[in-house]
Image (tube, rainbow, N blue to C red):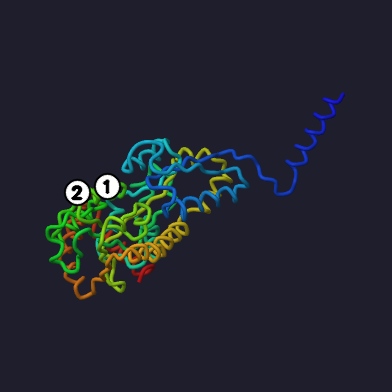
Amino acid sequence: MRIRLSSLVAAALVAVLVHLPGAARAQEYTLKVHHFLPTTTTGQVAVIQPWCDRIAKDSGGRLGCRIYPLMQLGGTPPQLYDQARDGIADVVWTLPGYTAGRFPASEAFELPFLMRNAEGASRALWNYAQQNRLFETEYRDVKVLALWLNDAGYLHTTSRPVRTLADFKGLKLRAPTRLTTRLLAALGASPVAMPVTAVPDSLAKGVIDGALLPWEVIPAIKVEELVRFHTETDPSSRAIYTNVFLLAMNRAAYERLPVELRRVVDAASGEALSAAAGRVWQNSRGPARKLATDRGNAVHVVPASELAHWERAAASVDDDWVKEVGARGLDGRALLDSARGLLRRFDP
């Protein structure tokens, strides 16, 4: 009798808890989120984790995430897109530019001297992807959650600063994408292509003399401890370069969610998330820069008059890209005009 009463009490308690107003439902879907940087990086702390928190809250706890940083699910950063496509991960954060030439239309936003502000430019990028049907073409194998740009990329060097166009000569500089490889070559440097995770070791061993990087990622990989000089560009000018970032979901994982949970994912994603991520990157510049100056590193700002020489030297990068994507059946000039038009609207 005692056992029976205890069982009845327990059953009654469960029934009360289940029907309490606002009681959270058990998590039914846990998304495996995979990326290539440490847990402390801006991407996880200020974009991925808040997105995961929002879908958990908006789904009443039915939908959640488990984040795997530093390629903990295996593979290399250039393989992340395929991991989302193939379902090794449910969600990935990566750079399309890590797989050279695979996303040619997206590269329009990685051409030199286009972006000014990462928030507005990221909103322009999302609209560009819609306008040019990139979600049905280049990204057709995944569900795109966000596309955004990092803050303006700068030069960070070990032995000598870069102040003029002539200073590029003889320097081995890290290039994050194939277009920045061409940019550095056009400016007179010797480009060395590598993902950001390889930069610290390459700097420490002298494989490279410096790197193209945004300020945002520097604290995560401690570059300020490995270089002495930082070259920024006039803030009134367009950035020398930027990178496209992608947050993408396995399409099957998205489609097997109940319709109400797909709506939760959609509401937390898209243009607003893209712009918010761009704003996070834009605002990261100050704290990261302070780490470098506190160490006594020198920061030089290249004036607009000198940047004009750089821009003229790099003009061939745009022309070559237009011809190259044209050979692949894309109207490169129309794509570049589309990107510039949207940047004038969202990033004047």
Q: Amino acid at mark 1?
A: Asp
Q: Where is residue 53 shown, x and y percent of the image?
A: 55, 50
- Label 1 belongs to which residue? 201
Above or below, 173 against 27 in this view is below
Q: Where is residue 311 shown, x and y percent of the image?
A: 19, 67
Sequence-first tag of 1 and 2: 1
The quadrant in which residue 339 appears is bottom left
Q: Where is residue 47 shown, x and y percent of the image?
A: 46, 54
Q: Amino acid at mark 2?
A: Val
- Label 2 belongs to which residue? 207
Q: Along the horizontal axis of the image, is 50 left or right of 290?
A: right
Residue 4 visible in the snapshot: yes
Q: Along the horizontal axis of the image, is 288 left or right of 313?
A: right
Of 301 and 260, which appears nearest the observer?
Answer: 301
Q: How many marks?
A: 2
Classify 10 Å Cα crowding around label 2: few (below 14), some (14-19), many (20 and above): some
Residue lying at 82% horizontally and 30% vertically, measured from the top left: 8
Determine the residue located farthest toward the right in the rendered image.
1
Above or below, 168 against 348 in this view is above
Q: Where is residue 310 shown, x and y percent of the image?
A: 18, 67
Q: Are marks 1 and 2 in contact (CB under 8 Å)?
A: yes
Above or below, 263 against 114 in this view is above
Of 135 and 93, which appears nearest the observer?
Answer: 93
Residue lying at 66% horizontally and 45% vertically, measured from the top left: 24
